[in-house]
Image (cartoon, helix red, strand yellow):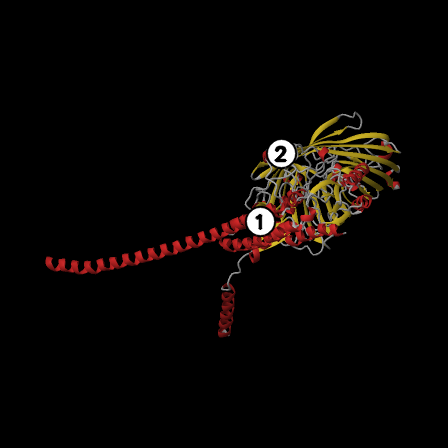
Amino acid sequence: MKMKLFRLLSLAMIGVAAFVAQPAQAAKIHVVATLTDLADLTRNIGGDLVEVHSLATGVEDTHGVPMKPSFVPLMNRADLLVLVGFDCEHAFLPALLEASKNPRIQYGKPGYVDCSQGIAPLDVPKSTDHSEGDVHPYGNPHYMLDPILAKTAIQNIYKALVASAPQYEADFTRNRDAYLATLDAKITEWEKEVGPLKGMEFVSYHEEWEYFAERFGMKVFGTIELKPGVDPTPHHIENLISTMKVEHVPIVVREPQFPDKVPKLIAENTGAALVKLPIMPGGVPHTETYIEMMDYIIHTLLATQHK
Amino acid sequence: MKKFMALVCIGLAVPMTQAEETNEVEQLKRQLQQMQENFDRVQREQKEQIDSLSKQLDALLRQQQAAAAVTSAPPVAASPEQLKELNERVDHVVEAQKKVRPNEFNPSIGLVGETVFSYRTKSSVETGSDRPGGFDVFQRSVELNVAASVDPFAKGYAVINATADSATGEAAATVEEAALQTTSLPWNLELKAGRFFGEFGRLGYIHDHELPFVNRPLVLDQYIGGESRTDGAQVNWLLPTPHYVSLTVGLGDQFGGDSPNPNDPGTTRHFSAVNYFGRLSTYFDLTPNWQLESGVSGLWNPKTVDRGGVILQPDGSGFAERERRLAGLDVKLSYVPLRNNQFRSFTWGTEVLYSDNRYLVDPSGNFYPSAPPPGLSAETVGSLGLYSYVTYKWHRQWSAGFLFDWVQDAQNHSDETFAYSPYITWALTHWNQLRLQYTHTDHNAVSGLQPDDAIYLQWAWIIGSHAHGWQQR
């Protein structure tokens, strides 16, 4: 009996020892990105060393991602929170941050990765009075639609990852450089492709395309919204249609989160082409990555020229 | 002997010197090798940099050549308009850099105004309402919200509200909330202390103007006393699990904002006369667009001292509360489409409350609570109440819904009140909202009150800062 007990104990001890002696799995860096473009960039830089969750799936309004309590445990465990900044996420992020009870990712902490650092904003309002709509006090936050500015975001994410896990600096550097090389090649390609679009004017639903237009030589003629976040009035739509006709504005852009009724009406009345363009990866099918999304945007705009 | 010792010393010293020399040689060799490696590395890095710069230079030259091929026009100096535009952009950037986060140094300040126009078919005597029958304009809220970080460890906020008196119209300001909330406690804890809306149920801690309908549900008004205001402290714990579970426990010396005599402690308040409350809530993503939130709540005051004074009953008897017990179950099912949730949504919310208070009963109804006559009986009254509503949003500006109320009187569960309220909301913008509501209120025979019809037009507006917190989501 004693012998049996001794054998059992020995086996148990060997089992415990074997379990303890297992090579420890390297803990991944937990990252929560507010939007899918930032999540994609983080995955490209972090590779297998990071586990990335995006709060948005791609089809949402960048200012109106639903505040789901299921985000809270994710944010509670996060080492890094990657965000657009310029108050882009003002409607949902502050409350989620408070609920997350995670001191590592609060504003001002190293885990709070504001990708707008180093970006000169466009359309900085002189006043934040609500008569101008839901204005962003720091300027237009939609800089991710400019791939050159996306490179600043990449650098901000890279620096945060290195600060979070300096032992993997070489891996992050290699991944970043490889991704930048790919992106640079695509930027050269896009800049060549957009030739026919240079100087072309277009109307969008929301003030989402200012950075994109500036990068690729297009012009934003106006928005369907009366002011940011404020629905159009009939008078505004009427005015927009008549001025578009006078100026021969050829394109109406609808972002996926907005209804198509008014953009369709404007396009029908002006003869402009109506296109649905994503504002982040996943916004329309086959745009799962940042590069795929930019490809889609440029090729869709170009396709309007062949009609 | 001396000679022998000298020889031994020399004998020892020679090999030691030889060893030192050998070490020195080895060290020099290593240094040389290291320097060689460093030299190679620097040379390699510099070559890489030179290659990279050469590539960049080539690319630039190619671009310039391509540009020159397209146009042979000489470079044009910047026009005054271009310079002006550039200056404006620089100014804007400087302006942006000057701005600080709204709550970083200065408190964010916002003001909410809310006016309710109404017409009721019955007088206040017939309906038991604290507002008059007929035409009424009620300035329900002039609410000042102030919030800022106190230090790296806490934030503070205050809500000062002025409500017009129904008789005089005078709007006296009261402190609805003024509390400190920690922001960096360990173990997923958060402490709130001061005057605040304690966590019980789902709409109890929502301010009037943020409700999905015009009036607070009857069951919350009657069992809680309106908003769940308390002077106390509460701790919230986010359970460290992958699934969202939140637990809140707290205590306060009263609970509920509207009671005329919250809870008189006399000269000494013992812990047995304090309100203890708590809520456990969880959440499920049914699909990416459908969500379910649920919670259970409890409130207990083991020894209340005549909260609300002596409550006279229709049969002439008087009730004086001695113990307060309240339990609640709340459910919210929402359809929040990811793609266009600003334009379309659906919510079904229900809250069921069970009040189980213990009263001292005087059949004559004229006893004095501070010195009740001997021989009075105690009675525990179990009463139930609920509200249930649906709201459908079909446009960024438009939504409509229906609210059903049913409540048994907390002192007499045979006395029942029902209310049916369809409502439609026009949110011109996020800061300017109108709501039209019709309410039919009915009572059973026990209450002795008359059925009533009412039309409400609520106009709520916001200026300055206004952020929805986690509880108002």
Q: Residue at x 54, y 45 (%)?
A: A110
Q: Decide which of B104, B141 is in the foreground and name it.
A: B104
Give residue A51's position: percent from left, percent from top. Answer: 59, 55
Q: Decide which of B209, B363 is in the foreground and name it.
A: B209
Kindly identify which numbered label has been placed on residue B79: 2
User: Within 10 angstroms of label 2, few (less than 14), some, or many (20 or more) residues?
Assistant: few
Give residue A54's position: percent from left, percent from top. Answer: 64, 51
Q: Considering the numbered disc 1 on the image, is that residue within a helix, a strand or a loop?
A: helix
Q: Considering the numbered disc 2 on the image, is that residue within a helix, a strand or a loop?
A: loop
Q: Amino acid at mark 2?
A: Ser
Q: Which residue is mark 1?
A: A154
User: Within 10 angstroms of label 1, few (less than 14), some, or many (20 or more) residues?
Assistant: many
Kindly identify which numbered label has been placed on residue B274: none
Label 2 vs label 1: CA separation?
Answer: 35 Å
Give residue B214's position: percent from left, percent from top. Answer: 80, 38
Chain letter for the residue marked with disc 2 in the picture: B
Q: Decide which of B228, B63 is in the foreground and name it.
A: B63
Q: Residue at x 49, y 54 (%)?
A: A167
Chain letter for the residue marked with disc 1 in the picture: A
Residue B390 shown left or right of residue B468 in the figure: right
Q: Amino acid at mark 1?
A: Ile
State whether residue B350 appears in this view: no
Quadrant containing the N terminus of chain B is bottom left
In this rendering, the answer to whether B161 lies above or below A74 is above
Marks 2, 1: nearer the viewer:
2
Same chain, labels 2 and 1: no
In this rendering, the answer to whether B214 lies above or below B6 is above
Quadrant containing the C terminus of chain B is top right
Give residue B195's position: percent from left, percent from top. Answer: 66, 35
